[in-house]
Image (cartoon, rainbow, N blue to C red):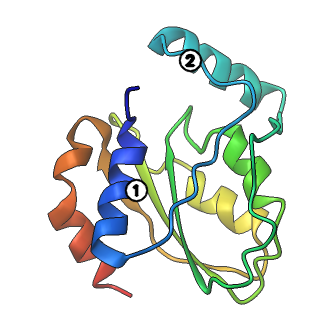
Amino acid sequence: MRVGNTEIAAQLLRELTGADLFKIEPVQPYSKDYNECIAQAQEDQRRDARPELKSCPNSLDGYGTVYLGYPNYWGTMPMAVFTFLERFDWNGKTIRPFCTHEGSGLGRSESDIRRLCPGAKVETGLEIYGSTSAKAGPAMKKWLARE
């Protein structure tokens, strides 16, 4: 099974921090075909969809900081990430977003996270070119040092 760029970056983050990993997966997965995938993602945004997730933690109470990784789909996070964020109380938590992309950076994802997670401290995110995610260690270390 192919591991995606965001998952590669998340595994690297885990190696650097010891953080727990949770994969946000919609029940209805996006196509493996790139063009079909981005068309599905765009349609989800157009409908402001909240896709059902395969699973979700019961609580984030044991976590003060959450590293939130996602690919950039049409200028922000996939709508499944919106579903995930809206499930929890983010008061007093810190969210450190990181995003894989192929040229569009974080887009408006940081402002979307702030809107979806009132009460959270949303720190400056890390942009990772997806095709180089396996080599993101130095940039990730520098980003982590800003804690």
Quarter of the image containing the N terminus?
top left
Q: CA distance from mark 2 to mark 1?
A: 21 Å
Looking at the rendered structure, the kind of residue marked 2 is Cys
Q: Is residue 103 above or below residue 91?
A: above
Write the residue at 76% across / 82% down: 119
Q: Is residue 105 above or below residue 90?
A: above
Residues packed near mark 2 inside 10 Å, few (<14), some (14 to 19) or many (20 plus): some
Look at the numbered disc 1 and give the secondary structure of its residue. Answer: helix
Looking at the rendered structure, the kind of residue marked 1 is Ala
Write the residue at 34% across / 65% down: 13
Q: Nearer the viewer, residue 115 or 141?
A: 141
Quarter of the image containing the C terminus?
bottom left
Residue 87, horizontal then vertical, whole percent: 84, 61
Look at the numbered disc 2 and give the secondary structure of its residue. Answer: helix
Residue 69 visible in rendering: yes
**Is 72 situated left or right of 142 in this image?**
right
Write the residue at 50% across / 16% down: 32
**Is 44 situated left or right of 139 in this image?**
right
Residue 115, horizontal then vertical, whole percent: 75, 64
Mark carried by residue 49? none
> Residue under circle 1?
10
> Residue under circle 2?
37
For this orientation, the residue located farthest to the front is 1
Residue 61, image quadrant: bottom right
Residue 105 visible in rendering: no
Residue 76, horizontal then vertical, whole percent: 58, 44
Residues packed near mark 1 inside 10 Å, few (<14), some (14 to 19) or many (20 plus): many
